[in-house]
Image (cartoon, coloured by chain):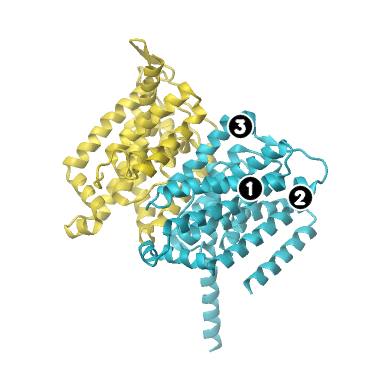
Chain colours: A yellow, B cyan
Amino acid sequence: MILLQSIVNGLLIGGVYALVAMGLNLMFGVMKLVNFAHGEFLMAGMYVAVWLASLGMLPGLFGIYWVAIPTMFVMAAVGFAFYLLLLDRAARFGESPQILLTIGLSIGAQGLAQVLRGSGFRLQPNPVNGAAIHLGGLNLQLGPTVAFTVALIVSMLMALLLRMTRFGKSARAVAESVETAEMLGIDARRVYIVTTSIAIGLVGLAGALLIPYHYTFPNVGQNFVVVAFLAIVIAGLGNVVGAVFGGLLMGVMQSLTASYFDLDLSTAAIYVVFLAVLLLRPQGLFTRGRRTL
Amino acid sequence: MRLAIIGVVWTIAAIAGVAIESDYLVSVATTMVFLGLWAQSWNVLSGLTGNISLGHSVFVAVAAYVTIILQQRGLSPLIGGILGVAAAVVLAAIIGAATLRLRGPYFTLATLSAAAVVLSLILHYSDLTGGPSGIAITFAHDAPLELEFTNVRAYYLIATALLAAVTMVISLLRRSRLGFYIAAIKSSEEVAAAAGIRVALVKVTVFCLSAALTALGGVAYVFYIGFADPNFLSGLTLSVQIALTAVVGGTGYLVGPIVGAMFYEAIDAAANAAFGAAGGWDVMILGFSVVAIVLSEPRGLCEMAVRLVRAIAGRMQSAVA
């Protein structure tokens, strides 16, 4: 029973990791860019959501969740600006400057959050926090359950988006080869803009789903993004749907180490798996052959 | 020639440090020199090979903790420090062997998360490491064999000597056989491999060298501060600071990381004086100045200075003509 409960807890925690990792891997797959500021976009999303929730909440148990969709759109707009103002201009310098740009942005954004909102921990009081569903002896925390459910729905929508829509097909073509895609008349820059907006919108959504049960503070992104980095490498860099399984796997591993050893050791356990995957299967667990996205 | 210049600059810096009366100024300068030392050591790997490490604080932490833990059990830090550096090199060899043969961001992600793992191990094994509260070293009198000095200037001299030594190592490395291998690998791995260079071995060797130099600084630093603080020593913040300091100064220049450290400490001191130490202004300014530098001149402050000097020289020449 402890085993089952730990696995369930892990899957539920993994929902947020999946959302964060999906955006990261979408950007990597299409743009070949690891966004080291991704955690800070999560942090920004959480602050936006906390602010919206402080304005007022709808009645009922799930009243706080009205902030999710507005936060997602605000962050998608932030992603749009992020691409046009920074990534677009850094693209001509090559890979290393782009990495350094996102790292600089990451630490700058942490400082900015501290300057604007202070370094205190914020939690908007709400009925979801602490509530749980009891299901045949299992105990499901309500906040993580909602986040997990939304993550699953979003990942299915993403899979459909990438397979069925014109944007998805363009994005996969660009991921395969920018030169060929442009020869076929695809506007790569437009694909990059939409990709960045979707990725940052998703991490904003993750932030909004976190705030009912997780504290908001300037460095909050770091806890999530390190796990999400490990998740995308274990799943396979650039594999968007794989990232969902990667995120859920991270949650389960974390929960199992916490139950049977100690929560402090969970990062170490994940890291051992990470190094093993790099040595034995560098393309990732969920990527077959070379095809990604 | 270059070695002579480094020697002269070091002598001047050392005399200046001893002559300055204010202990506060000397400790700011010492912190700056340590940051410059780490950024310089980081540059051995990342500047020369282009593989960006975001976990260099892990080598600071490993060396510092090994030395302190052994010292508490009666081993002089002069010997413990060597073991601490050796531990950092072993760790670098493991991370490097797993990731440096792969292309793309694997290495950066592996180093970044390695620091998080070591931090969690330090926090977990609190019997050995003191956990989140760290290990404080207290001493009342000078004991050179224990690396314990009551005057902060002693640590300033140690730090500047280490920085001068690391700078000399890089200067020599660039013109050594290994240095040419590295330059070849940076411009094209395929061509370098075709020319018979064992690419993976060279990269791992350089990573181990960079880790060893960083670790040396870690051993001296922890005695200077007198406190092994896990969240600082193995934190992501320090790793990012080290990397950004080198980048701001300019990774292509021998003095780049040192210029970057001066820039950072100047911002830090100014922000602390203007807004107080806890406001987050210093990291905000450092972060956004990196963004500005990447967008305007990715080669850093040194390149900007060189351009400025050239522009002024050009204008003066045309004025004379």
Q: Is label 3 in contact with label 2 (beta carbons under 8 Å)?
A: no
Q: Are marks 3 and 2 on the same chain?
A: yes
The residue marked by circle 2 belongs to what chain? B
User: Looking at the image, is mark 2 or mark 1 nearer the viewer?
Assistant: 1
Query: Above or below — where is B222 with respect to A65?
Result: below
Q: Callout 3: helix, strand or loop?
A: helix
Q: Is residue B141 among the parts visible in the rendering?
A: yes
Which residue position is annotated with label 1? B218
Q: Is residue A189 above or below residue A165?
A: below
Which residue corresponds to the image point at 63% horizontal and 48% vertical from the top-left? B218
Type of amino acid under label 2: Val
Q: Earlier in the sequence, mark 2 or mark 1?
A: 2
The verdict on a common chain for dots 3 and 1 is: yes
Q: Residue furthest bottom?
A: B321
Where is residue A161? Give x, y as percent.
21, 39
Q: Are marks 2 and 1 on the same chain?
A: yes
- Local packing at callout 3 (Cα closer than 10 Å; few below 14, some 14-19, many 20+) is some
Which label number is shown at residue B132? 3
Give the CA distance from mark 3 to mark 2.
Answer: 26 Å
Q: Is residue B288 left or right of residue A293?
A: right
Q: Are marks 2 and 1 in contact (CB under 8 Å)?
A: no
Q: Amino acid at mark 3?
A: Pro
| Chain letter, disc 1 residue | B
- Please name the amino acid that badge 1 sits on: Gly
